[in-house]
Image: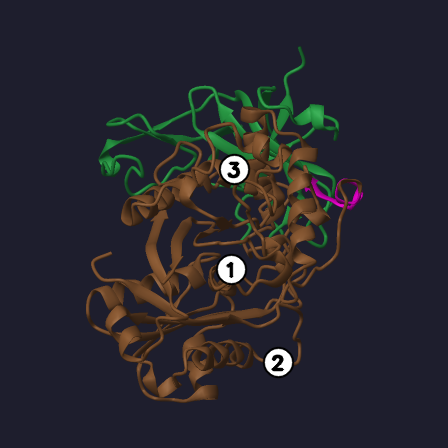
Chain colours: A green, B brown
């Protein structure tokens, strides 16, 4: 069902659009133990077991540090390669996985500790069966 | 353990590609070989613990081939720890006193899956958007985390493949039996840097089975001469860790299971004569040297550089050739690792025999996450 062609659908549950359609991240933090999750509908805290009423929604930073990454050269059929699969620790949490773009495909481009920012863009032109477009997050290096 | 438990028969089929055979046939072949070795029949089995990730009700399908005796069959799906989970369940059930003779079978048919398997269906494909969910990428990321912590290089990781492939040249049951010098490993197709093709285990078809007995039953049947005592049987799941499961943690569960196994057996890492660990990718073998306490934190790199884990080294690892060479039929792998230890402890490993091997460890870890560690000693 295409309800509003002007607003794409978030590709993942940790992406939210505000009323004007501007995308951002959403996450949950446990007020009992501090654990952060790239999620918006947790039932309880996986670290301490606190129930949902102890989980607060917050807006994570759009900057973070590359924790680990690989340069993918062989992918599923129909997926363009190469691309960089990256695990990023957002400043203040949580950890988010995604694709690192606008950088090279050499080992030095995926060194741990590289500072990155989160950008939002169309989900590589992929649409669902109803023809809806999706918006996804991408990591890009923050130029020194 | 409160009473000693033994493997009295164990076998694996030659891992490979069997597109014209059914998973039940593969499992039946392994099960019959294990039963024959134990000099028992399916009618002696009081229960079956079986597992497969791609075939449902595999235990029933195997017994439809070799004898439908009506016994309890429980099928397990526990990723790469499935086969070891079956043996773990056998130990629990025998310890509980419910049974004294149990069959364990792990089977996987993977021909046609390709190297990477398939994408999980969703509204839109996420591969390339949410990074990569392929196993080479997931384990590559874990390996890069290890490299950042320890200074391990791609060549260090590649050396694991050189070692394990060399070992497999002496194992007729391995799928890949050829030497792969360092340059060949490094120059093979990059799948997900730092992993090249020769640093990834191979998707093959396989089955492995074991007959597990209580001490009383082993003595009654006069099987102590071939029995392998299970000194420890321990499993763990992933403890909470800030990046898990965004980044699957294979280290924590392995450490927990290993520590439990050492405590259960009273065996010290330095007492081990050999280890068959879960080298699904070359990178993770170095991580598991540390996770299994074969060396101190950060010393895994030194272990591969100085040859400590080669045959003839201080603690030989993956003497069978490991998953990198045998191939990795998911649910069969756990029992296949135990088969190598049994063969070694019986002194039947031919040219890859570790002289005087008395105590051996097996380890598997399945993403999600489940780790199993067993320690064995010749009875």
What residue is shown with label 3?
B287
Mark 1 lies on a secondary structure that is helix
How far apart marks 3 and 1 lie (CA) works out to 24 Å
Give x and y (percent) for residue A54: 24, 32
From the image, state whether disc 1 or disc 2 is nearer to you.
1
Give the farthest residue toward the front.
B356
Q: Earlier in the sequence, mark 3 or mark 1?
A: 3
Chain letter, disc 2 residue = B
How far apart marks 1 and 2 lie (CA) works out to 30 Å
Identify which residue, B39 or B347, lies in the foreground.
Answer: B347
How far apart marks 3 and 2 lie (CA) works out to 36 Å
Mark 3 lies on a secondary structure that is helix
Identify whether B290 is placed above or below B124.
above
Q: Indicate the quadrant containing the C terminus of chain B: top left, top right, bottom left or bottom right.
A: bottom left
**Residue B191 among magenta residues:** yes
Tell me the magenta residue range.
B184-193
From the image, state whether disc 3 or disc 1 is nearer to you.
1
What residue is shown with label 1?
B344
Give x and y (percent) for residue B268: 36, 41
A123 sits left or right of A63 in the view: right
Give the farthest residue toward the top.
A144
Identify whether A142 is placed above or below B326.
above
């Amino acid at each position: 069902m295409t309800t509003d062609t002007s607003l794409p659908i978030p590709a993942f549950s940790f992406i939210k659009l505000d009323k004007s359609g501007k995308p951002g991240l959403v996450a949950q933090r446990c007020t009992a133990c501090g654990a952060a999750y790239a999620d918006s509908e947790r039932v309880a805290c996986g670290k301490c077991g606190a129930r949902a009423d102890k989980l607060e929604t917050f807006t994570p930073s759009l900057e973070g540090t590359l924790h680990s990454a690989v340069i993918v050269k062989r992918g599923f059929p129909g997926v363009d390669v190469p691309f960089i699969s990256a695990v990023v620790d957002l400043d203040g949490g949580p950890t988010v996985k995604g694709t690192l773009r606008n950088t090279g495909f050499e080992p030095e481009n995926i060194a741990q500790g590289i500072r990155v920012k989160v950008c939002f863009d169309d989900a590589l032109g992929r649409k669902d069966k109803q023809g809806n477009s999706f918006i996804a997050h991408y990591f890009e290096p923050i130029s020194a | 353990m409160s009473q000693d438990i033994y493997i009295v028969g164990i076998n694996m089929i030659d891992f490979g590609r069997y597109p014209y055979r059914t998973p039940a046939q593969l499992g039946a072949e392994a099960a019959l070989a294990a039963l024959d070795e134990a000099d028992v029949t399916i009618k002696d089995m009081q229960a079956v613990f079986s597992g497969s990730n791609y075939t449902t009700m595999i235990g029933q399908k195997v017994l439809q081939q070799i004898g439908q005796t009506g016994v309890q069959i429980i099928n397990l799906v526990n990723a790469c720890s499935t086969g070891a989970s079956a043996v773990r369940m056998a130990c629990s059930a025998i310890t509980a006193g419910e049974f004294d003779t149990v069959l364990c079978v792990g089977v996987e048919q993977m021909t046609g899956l390709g190297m990477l398997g398939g994408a999980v269906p969703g509204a839109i494909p996420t591969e390339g958007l949410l990074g990569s969910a392929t196993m080479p990428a997931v384990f590559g990321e874990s390996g890069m985390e290890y490299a950042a912590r320890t200074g391990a290089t791609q060549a260090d990781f590649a050396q694991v493949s050189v070692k394990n492939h060399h070992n497999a040249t002496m194992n007729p049951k391995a799928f890949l039996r050829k030497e792969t010098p360092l340059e060949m490993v490094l120059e093979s197709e990059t799948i997900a840097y730092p992993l090249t093709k020769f640093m990834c285990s191979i998707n093959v078809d396989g089955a492995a089975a074991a007959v597990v007995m209580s001490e009383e039953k082993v003595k009654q049947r006069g099987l102590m001469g071939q029995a392998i005592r299970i000194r420890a049987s321990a499993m763990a799941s992933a403890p909470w860790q800030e990046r898990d499961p965004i980044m699957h943690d294979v280290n924590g569960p392995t450490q927990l299971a290993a520590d439990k196994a050492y405590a259960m057996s009273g065996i010290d890492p330095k007492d081990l004569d050999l280890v068959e660990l879960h080298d699904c990718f070359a990178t993770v073998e170095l991580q598991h040297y540390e996770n299994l306490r074969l060396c101190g934190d950060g010393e895994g790199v030194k272990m591969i550089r100085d040859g400590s884990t080669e045959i003839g080294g201080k603690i030989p690892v993956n003497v069978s050739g490991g998953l990198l060479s045998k191939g990795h039929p998911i649910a069969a792998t756990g029992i296949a690792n135990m088969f190598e230890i049994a063969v070694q402890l019986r002194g039947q490993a031919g040219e890859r025999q570790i002289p005087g091997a008395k105590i051996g460890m097996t380890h598997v870890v399945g993403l999600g996450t489940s780790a199993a560690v067993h320690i064995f000693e010749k009875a």
